[in-house]
Image: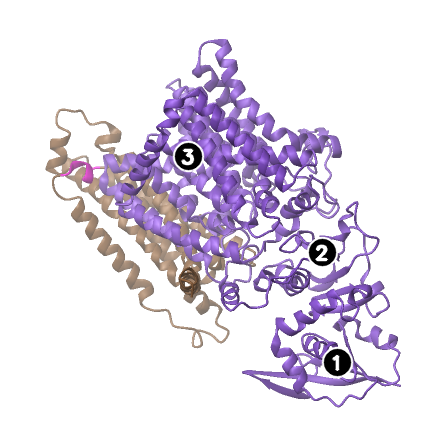
Amino acid sequence: MSGGAKAGNAGRAPSAATAGFQPAYGASIGVAVGFACFALLVPLGGVSYYVGAPDEPGAFAAAARAGWLWFACTAAGVLWGVLVAWLAGAGERTRSWLARGGVVFLAAYLLCLRGAWGRVARELALAPAGPARAPAAPAAAWSAPLLAVVVAGAALWIATRGSRPGAARAPALTLAGVHLLCSLTAAITTVQLAYYVSRTPAFLRGLGRLAAFLAGR
Amino acid sequence: MLTLSLTALTVLAGLAAAHALRIGAAAERWLFAGTSACATIVLVQTILGATGLLTRPAVALTTIVVAAAVAAASVFAARAAVGGAWRAELATLREAARLLRHPEIAALAVMAAAAFAWVLVAAALLPPRSVDDLGHHLPPVFEAAVRGRFVLPPLNLHPWFAYPLNADLLSLWPVVLERSIALVNFAQAGTAGLAALSIAALARLAQASRRMAVFCGLVFLLLPVTLRQAGACYTDVTIAAFFGAAAVGVAGAFEQGRATSLLLAGLGAGLLAGTKYHMLFAVLLMLPLVAVAARRCSPDARRRAGATLLFAAPVLALASFWLLRNLLELGNPCYPYRVGLGPLTIFANRLPADSPLLGSPPLLLGILRTPATVWRIVFTDCGLGNVDGGLGPVFWGAVAPLGFWCAAAALWRLVRRRGSGGLALGLLFLAGAFPYAASQAATAGVTTRFLLTAAVPGFAMLAAALTRRLESTPVVGRAAVVGVALIAGLGVVQLGGDREPNERKQTMNFGPAAAARAQHAFASPWRFVQNAAFGPNRLAPARDFLDLVTAPPGEAVRPLWIYATSRSAAGFYGRRLQNRIWNFGAPDRPATPDALVYYFARIEGVEKVEASGDKIPWEDIAGRRDRCELVFATPETAVFFRRELLAPGGDMWRRILAYYEKADPTLAVVAAKTALPFAEGDVVLATDPLGFGLKALEMTSRLRYQVLLVHRREIDALVGNIRTTGTVWLVAPATANGPTATRTVQVGDRLVGFFVLKAASR
């Protein structure tokens, strides 16, 4: 814990929920790492739910596979995180690092941005004459989400540094819960983002028409 | 204008009542005002519709009397509170404006404003275009407006006609008052605001900050399903608003022991119970909370009974009519569904034997049997980009799990006798989710909109959770708020685009309609309905034609009785309700219809006519011109008019000529340029669309030969029936798969190709 955190809790006996049930901090990080695995493993190009059209043959089965993949990654991440946190020992410094890490790892959910390239991945998968005729997967499909994660992670790292105890130390079980909700939300966003991206150009055109209409033109 | 004035009057009367009842929280006060306005509108129309007095003067007068009575009673009961209301509302406005300084609220408010501007413009420029609107929501509404009383349209056409209509009465309101369908799409845009208010009010009851309460209300407004439905005549957003009002009332009474909250609960629950059978489950699940709340309101038995009556009376007044009508007229209050308990059947099922709903278990059972169903629902976000619009990642990923978790935790606390904190909100979430869980598994993909009711307490829980995070761990809270705001913003983009293969119900592309209005084009709003399945888009040209000949811009209405086929035929009444559907069996209908509209629906790859009601087979009309004349055709539609209506120089003759000449002026130019060498006495059969131009030339005596419009499906039959000394020719546009063009004509930037065939020679 940071010095501020210690000062903030001075005189009170730490409870499991507020002062850090240490394996739960590990579980938080594990959930985030599990999501990262999901985001990198989910076969965006192999499924059809990217258009948001579950009538398409195979879409339901693909969605179910994605759901089980998320569940498996999350469960494995939680087990891994709890184990590592438990093995790391119960020292105050370790607990502090884990608590801070639990917050900083919230940035991992920005990997859901990878879903924005789902349509390209889909075109690659469905290319009639093989990858040669299909659009090349842009390097941004990997670099942009990773860059976003690094930038957001750095921002969270800075934000959790210093004298604000509440900023750095989230209640452990609550933080694990927040991670679970963020992970599921980000997983759904990962597989649905291509749909939203595909609608954006038409939306912008429509927005222009709306502005013109409201302006009387 | 009358609609807006009377609506404002009912809202202001409700606001006065809210002040008289000393409802302190601004969101709850405005929610009460909106809900009581809805209740007034519904109750007035229910009474007048049931008694056959549903006319514009009666509705306006009764509404004014009711609103004035409510306002007067409020002033009489609490003069000081009502007198100082304007100061309180001014303070509310200032507070709302101050909230805009928070970046996440400012961003979502801007997005919501833009999105709802889009929804409202589309609602104003486009006609009702969703298949369910035209198929079963609007026919009872339009029929009531035309006849001045509630009637049950033929149930063999659609069993859903027997549904309770409370929410649909909000669509009926402007139709009756304006005698036009111009404002029919707007009801749910208003009730979406009420639903957002109910989230804010519930969130405040759950100790959320004002900031997060407003934030989550805005997120609800940006849900894909909210935006997709806000401009349609569906009822799901309205149902969410009614449920929200009931939930706020129940939670207020339960948590704070306020008896007056039970009045709001009763209004909401009554409106809800009279809207959709599924929602009876939700109301039933609220009853234990209401019972406990009534006990908390007062230890005195008489006061407790009074508090209970505050809930029960509006429920009975608002919901009983539809259930009683169905019981008395159809023998089943929940027609057409079976009502029973396990194997015990109280009211038998009346669904058609081939209905996919029969034999499909409740969704909850389906999920228990196949857990992967949950992933299918969650990860496809059923409805997104498809039928209704999805609920979005925030709902599936955060709101739904949080709702179930909080409900379970509250129940666990109750079981361990550790108090009832959060119990009301938890049970209300379950009550909101239950209608979806109880719906048939076969409809899992299209009824996720039923979860909008669960979304109301769910987003209130999210607001409370975010508030706690912002207070205890600001970094985590801020990160979560930013994430929710970013994802919520995604919902807006699904308004754009009209090329999705599965975009069925609610096309939002208003651009062509706006351009036509700016250019004063001769067009009805139906011309711009695109990409909707089950007919609305393929029927659009015929509806455009019918509307323009029966109610041309600036001219008098010429009512027509129309025989129409297709699933969504029942909902087409024209802009000024001038077109009546003949096969409804109205008591005043003539023996024969004025117009016959045949629609060749594409069903499992085969095009065929879906006739309903009193049938006039296509074979009785096609290929003959003794009783009817073909006046309009597309590959999918054929419109015939009775010959008596088409006397040269007559009113309808003139209107049809105006359509041919104005609807697409280039056609007449093309026809004139064809310079076809037909002789006097020849008969030229012409198909769409070139035929309209040729017909216009013939009607203005500029041709020496006769032109007959013909549908492609009746050419062979018609050729054999034509009696002429000359030659029969066939002129039709060249198509990619049909005969190649024998002639082409350049018109502007269009190259029009057509072919000419000698069909018969005498």
Label 2 SS:
loop
Tell me the number on the disc at residue B559.
Answer: 2
Q: In this rendering, do the residues under marks 1 and 3 share a single chain?
A: yes
**CA distance separating discs 2 and 3:** 42 Å
Q: Is residue A167 magenta?
A: yes
Check chain identity for marks 2 and 1: say if they share one.
Answer: yes
Looking at the picture, does residue A46 appear above or below residue A180? below
Three-letter code, disc 3: Trp
- Residue in front for this viewpoint, A130 or B241: B241
Q: Quadrant of residue B398?
A: top left
Which residue is disc 3 drawn over? B30
* Chain of the residue displaying label 1: B
Q: Residue at x 70, y 89 (%)?
A: B675
Alpha carbon distance from label 2 to label 1: 28 Å
Looking at this rendering, what residue extends furthest in the bottom direction? B677
Side of B478 relative to B440 (left or right): left
Which residue in the structure is indicated by mark 1?
A: B701
Asked if the residue under mark 3 is in contact with the one under mark 2, i.e. CB atoms within 8 Å, the reply is no
Judged by depth in the image, the label closer to the viewer, 1 or 3, is 1
**Shade representing chain A:** brown
Q: Secondary structure at mark 1?
A: loop
User: Which amino acid does the dot numbered 1 rest on?
Assistant: Ser
Is B277 displayed left or right of B77 in the figure? right
Height in image: A7 above or below B706?
A: above
Residue B646 part of the magenta segment: no
Disc 2 residue type (three-letter) = Pro
Q: Earlier in the sequence, mark 2 or mark 3?
A: 3
Judged by its main secondary structure, the magenta piece is helix
Work out how far the residue at label 1 is from the one at label 3, CA to CA, in angstroms: 64 Å
